[in-house]
Structures are given as C-alpha cells and as structure tokens.
Image: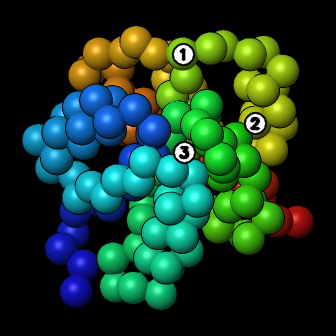
Amino acid sequence: MREGRKHILIADDEESILLSVSLILMKAGYRVTSANRGEDALREIIESLQSPDPVDLLVCDLVMPGLSGTGLIEKLIAAGVCIPVVAMTGVIDPAVIASLRAKGSCTLLPKPFDRNELLARVAESFAGQLKTCLPQG
C-alpha cells in the first residue's frame, strides 16, 4: 500500500553522489530507491509501474557507462513512461540539453549542486512542470 510519500529513483554511477542525494531526499521525507547503472534504473522504473508504489520521479546523471542518463530518458519515452526527471550533469552540452527539452523532458541540475538546489529542482518537477514524455494529441 502506498504510504503517501513520493517515490524517487536516483541513478548515478558515482557512489558518493548516489549516497549523498539519497540521504538528502530521505531526510526531506521522500521514499528513495537507487541504481548505479542506467539499465538497473530502467528495470526498476518499469517494474515499479506494476507495484502499489511506482516511481514518481527520476533523478539521474546524464553521463554513466552503459546506458547513459540520456539513453535512459529516451528509453522511458519510447516505453510511454511519463514521469518527471531531474538530470544531473557536470558537463553542460547545449546540444544534449536542447535535445532533452525538445522531447519535453527534464529539468537540469548542474554538478556540483547543494542541498537546496536539489530540493528546489525536485519540488519544481513534482509541481508538474516537466515530464519525460510529450503530451498526446
């Protein structure tokens, strides 16, 4: 049964980022699941759709080995999964940002960031401003 807390999945290949973001979000009252690979994050999100506690938000690094954050977002869009995304990145690539925005997805969180920046991006994403899929119609 759903506890009423928003469920956030964090995907980052850097263990220190994964741990610090998880702790910040848990202390803020969110339920947190983590994955250190894009493939694992994709599986977790898809599986959660069949559970009573689906993932409500993805916070992911754009640059990861294997399935990158960008690739993860594209696979979610292709699967018709429509959840907000906060994309963390240490490398601002205008072409990647433009591509993600053109697909109707994600808010950007440049690394390094502080606790307040993370919580603000999560709050704005939950406000329904950004989704990982384009509106139908």
According to the image, label 1 marks what residue? 90
Left or right for 105, reference 33: right
Q: Is any part of residue 137 visible from this angle?
A: yes
> Of callouts 1 and 2, which one flags the residue occurring earlier in the amino acid sequence?
1
Q: CA distance from mark 1 to mark 2?
A: 16 Å
Extreme residue in the front direction:
65
The amino acid sitting under disc 2 is: Leu
Residue drawn 21% across the image and 69% down it: 4
The amino acid sitting under disc 1 is: Gly
> Of callouts 2 and 3, which one flags the residue occurring earlier in the amino acid sequence?
3
Left or right for 8, reference 24: right
> Of callouts 3 and 1, which one flags the residue occurring earlier in the amino acid sequence?
3
According to the image, label 2 marks what residue? 100
- Quadrant where the N terminus is found in the figure: bottom left
Q: Is any part of residue 25 visible from this angle?
A: no
Residue 119 drawn at (x, y percent): 30, 31
